[in-house]
Image (spheres, rainbow, N blue to C red):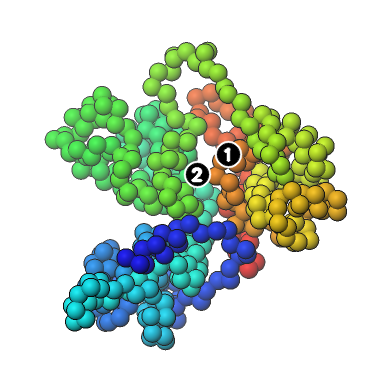
Amino acid sequence: MAASSGVGAAADRGDSECILEPLSLPESPCGVAAVEESPSVPCIFCEEYFPQAEQDQLLKHMIIEHKLVIADVKLVADFRRYILYWKKRFTEQPITDFCSVIRTNSEAPVEEQDNYFLLCDVLPEDRLLREQLQQKRLREILEQQQRERDDTSFHSICMFCDKEFTGNRSVLFNHMARDHAFNVGLPDNIVNCNEFLAALQKKLDNLQCLYCEKTFRDKNTLKDHMRKKQHRRINAKNTEYDRFYIINYLEFGKSWEEVQSEDDRELLDNLEEDWSDWEEHPVCAVCLFCEKQADTTEKLCFHMKEAHGFDLLKIKAEHGLKFYQQVKLVNFIRREIHQCRCYNCKEMFQSKTELISHMEVTKHITFLPTRSTWDQPQYYFPTYENDTLLCTLSDSEDELTAKDQSEDVPIISEDISDLEALRQSSVLNQLLREENNN
């Protein structure tokens, strides 16, 4: 079909030149709460309503009855608000103003031909709507996660030994990882914690293995099975758990399973295994302004200072840059250099060589633009997927003050920090503050 190439092109978008302005989404007079209280989703064209859990039935209805196909529905963060938006827009303008027309049976007689309408993010308005819905969803889930992280009234019972835990949720998760070898990743990767624990407990109450999801005749049989088969973990293929991992809201296409595999606290099957022959291969980071590579941050920073007059360590100290601020600065500079644009005067050049020459001669390479230019949420995401420099960034050593820890307590980076200071400098707080200021 002719429209298929357009859909494929939508998946390969270039970098946006700026942060797009938010849309005004259709909401009831009572606001978000009223929208969320209603579980039904209307058809875009008629008065049919479908339960939100039956999204596929609504999509099927619109294809069969109204010839409308919505591309990449799984990437729509809030399906109901998306449908409400287009239901209103389709009453204001003809559908052909928004959708590509796909003609089937084009070689058949006219009476046997059908026109289908494809709604996808090739349309700038649709792309902007999807981005706005994703940002709104992210804000809501970050607020929920922050509430759970700060909550000291948490109360739950271990699903394996019936031991009672109160205080912070991390206490229970650490206990299950340490005493029962049941590891679901770092507590701070989890959101909607109570729902998560309830879903796991329900499976165990139904005598169902958490990993293979087979059902057993009694609790003891289930317990022996999970221990012998090493099934004290979650089924990686069960998308039911996706909503409980924050990464699924931050980055489409990256599953919670990948988060778990990245967890530094993953329990080893054989604790006595000899790692003495481990050889660590040096990781090379690339200069921000040329192709020079170095196997340590110190060497790379020295090169950028001597060769280009850009002193990253000095900038970090003078501006008091925390880890995530350094990440945003690096990603900002990478993007500007990639687009052959001077990040101070915004002048464009035909080549990277001309750009760097200009920046060095004018000293534009030495000084940063105003903080508001680069200290933005969009620069949390890397310009280059394999940017090793991002992995070598760190806070200053004097910014983290370690506290004494008992040897039998699993160590998490946030456990060994000043928790109050961490809460104040958390990237989640920063995101929320920036959103409230907009």
Q: Residue at x 63, y 60 (%)?
A: 433
Disc 1 marks which residue? 414
> Quick one: quadrant of the C terminus?
bottom right
Q: Where, by quadrant of the figure, is residue 273 drawn?
A: top left
> What residue occupies the far front of the structure in this picture?
107
> What residue occupies the far left of the structure in this picture?
217
- Please tell me how many numbered marks the rendered image carries: 2
**Disc 2 to disc 1, how far (Cα)?**
9 Å
Which residue type carries mark 2? Asp
x then y, percent, for residue 412: 54, 34
Q: Residue at x 66, y 29 (%)?
A: 295
x then y, percent, for residue 335: 65, 53
x then y, percent, for residue 376: 64, 58
For the residue pair 359 and 70, the one nearer the viewer reads as 359
x then y, percent, for residue 116: 29, 74
Disc 2 marks which residue? 188
> What residue occupies the far bottom of the structure in this picture?
92
- Counting residues from the N terminus, which is met first, the one under dot 2 or under dot 1? 2
For the residue pair 196 and 352, the one nearer the viewer reads as 352
> Can the viewer see residue 276?
yes
For the residue pair 71 and 323, the one nearer the viewer reads as 71
Q: Residue at x 66, y 43 (%)?
A: 323
